[in-house]
Amino acid sequence: MRLILCCDYGLDDALATCDVLLHAPAEDREVTLVAVGGNVPAAVSLANAKKLVAHFPHPLPPVTIVDTSAEAQPACFLKEIHGEDGMGELFPAAQPPCPVQSFGEFLRDLSGPYLLLSLGPMTLIPRILARGVCEKFLFMGGNIAEQPNYHGYEFNHALDRAAFSRAVRHPHTAVTMDTCRRPQLNIQEESIAGEGILFRIARRIRDMTRISGEKGCYVWDDIAVKVLRHPDWFLTEQRTDRDGNLLTVAKYVLGKPYLEIMEQ
């Protein structure tokens, strides 16, 4: 089934996307990468999506990249967390071996069933949910009990609270800060010795958190991919956030360290 992956291409989005692309051929999935604004402006997000696909070292599933740079949407440029190019300076600019279409073209053509995984702010998500048949909607965003990381909220939630509230009215699974900020998922003190693309990105994520002074290193967005691909690793519970949104929150119960599950 088609998977629509909406990413504001910083480092954790890059790792999550590589996880999706690595497993999509075996899962017979067509992948649409919607490059949105958030960690970086939408135009930078688009450039990062292109070079990530261009430098992906494994066979690709059918992939389309969606350019949202003409759409009004909030964004920061968190260089202290994601590097000067927004993606850790890991990959040079390159053109991908796949089609690129505008967001308007993408919406016009969107029909039939799909899975939707949102890893950035929710500004464009209600417009996607209004098209076709979304059979499963998961997102990384929000917080319940964990200390917020941006103006009193989780970053993706904070950048467009109104769109977040609209989107979560649709049946969903929320991968909140509470889902991700678990001791066994913290890689800040890990050696990360592997040589594959996932290990390469994870090392850069870890190094950037050490430089920026963050307390802990959690690969937020890839945990959302794990919820999609391995729902049996998680339980869900109904929780209400500070804005009164009722969220179906995933809780990690497998218990294994992140580096043990990263390539699964």
Image (cartoon, grey):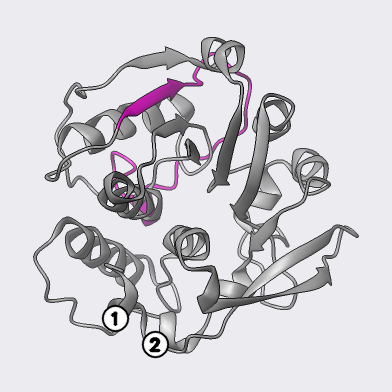
Could you tell whether 15 is left or right of 155 in the image?
left
Q: Quadrant of residue 16?
A: bottom left
* Range covered by the magenta-colored residues: 62-87
Circle 1 residue:
260
- CB-based contact (under 8 Å), mark 1 and mark 2: yes
Q: Quadrant of residue 99?
A: top left
Q: Position of residue 191 (x, y in %)?
A: 18, 82
> Which residue sits furthest left?
195
Q: Is residue 76 magenta?
A: yes
Residue at 51 percent of width and 60 percent of height = 224
Q: Is residue 122 visible?
A: no
Q: Quadrant of residue 128?
A: top right
Could you say which is closer to the camera, residue 72 or residue 58? 58
At mark 1, the secondary structure is: helix
Mark 2: few, some, or many residues within 10 Å (few <14, many ≥20)? Answer: few
Query: In what quadrant of the picture does the C terminus appear?
Result: bottom left
The dot on residue 52 is none
Circle 2 residue:
256
Q: Is residue 195 above or below residue 81?
A: below
Q: Position of residue 45 (x, y in %)?
A: 40, 32
Secondary structure mostly taken by the magenta-highlighted segment of the chain:
loop
Q: Position of residue 17 (x, y in %)?
A: 35, 47
Q: Amino acid at mark 2?
A: Lys
Q: Amino acid at mark 1?
A: Glu
Q: Is residue 216 magenta?
A: no
At mark 2, the secondary structure is: loop
